[in-house]
Amino acid sequence: MAKLKLVANPTFAAEVGIPIAGADPVPVQFTFKHRTKTALDTWIASRTDKNDADSFMEMVEGWDLEDEYNRANVDLLLENYIGVALATYRTYINELVQAKLKN
């Protein structure tokens, strides 16, 4: 049985179903940046002035895709798959909240 650490790991992995027009979502593994409750509240409040790519880069540290994780490829992903920003954000928030509920 895993022991609880008072300070969470700085990153965590979670799968996001990437919405594909006319097809089932494609699961992609992302590495997300962990935030404390206070940091998450502050970050959510700060998102009003940010675009999807900025928010995405602040949530995600890496991904399990053949293409390198960088700003240009994030922009390309967000441009080609319109629902990915919302799907990623929802997964991120759900993982953080569910982790807090489970602990």
Image (spheres, grey):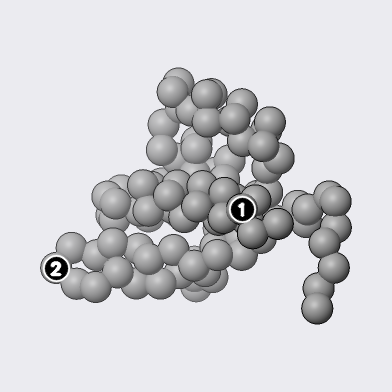
Numbered disc in front, either 2 or 1: 1
Q: Is residue 35 left or right of 85 when viewed as pictured? A: right
Mark 2 or mark 1: which comes first in sequence? 2
Res. 101 mark: 1
| SS category of the residue bearing label 1 | helix
Q: Residue at x 37, y 66 (%)?
A: 17
Crowd rating for badge 2 (residues with CA inside 10 Å; few <14, some 14–19, many 20+): few
Q: Residue at x 67, y 37 (%)?
A: 37
* 49 over 8 or under it: above or below: above
Residue at point 30%, 69% (across, down):
25
Q: Quadrant of residue 5?
A: bottom right
Identity of the residue furthest to the left in this view: 22
Give the residue at mark 2.
22
Q: Residues within 10 Å of mark 1 (few under 14, many from 20)?
A: few
For residue 65, the mark is none
Q: Along the line of sight, which residue is nearer the eye, 48 or 76? A: 48
- Say which amino acid is labelled 2: Gly
Residue 79 in the image: state x and y as whole percent: 30, 48
User: In terms of image quadrants, where is residue 32?
Assistant: bottom right
Q: Secondary structure at mark 2?
A: loop
Q: Which residue does the image show at 53% across and 24% down from the upper left?
A: 46
Q: Position of residue 94 (x, y in %)?
A: 50, 52
Q: Position of residue 66 (x, y in %)?
A: 50, 73
The answer to whether residue 63 is visible is: no
Is residue 89 something that shows in the picture?
yes
Q: Residue farthest to the top?
A: 49
Amino acid carrying label 1: it is Leu
Seen from the viewer's position, the closer of residues 15 and 68 is 15
Figure quadrant of the N terminus: bottom right
Quarter placement of the C terminus: bottom right
Q: Position of residue 48 (x, y in %)?
A: 44, 23
Q: Residue furthest bottom?
A: 1
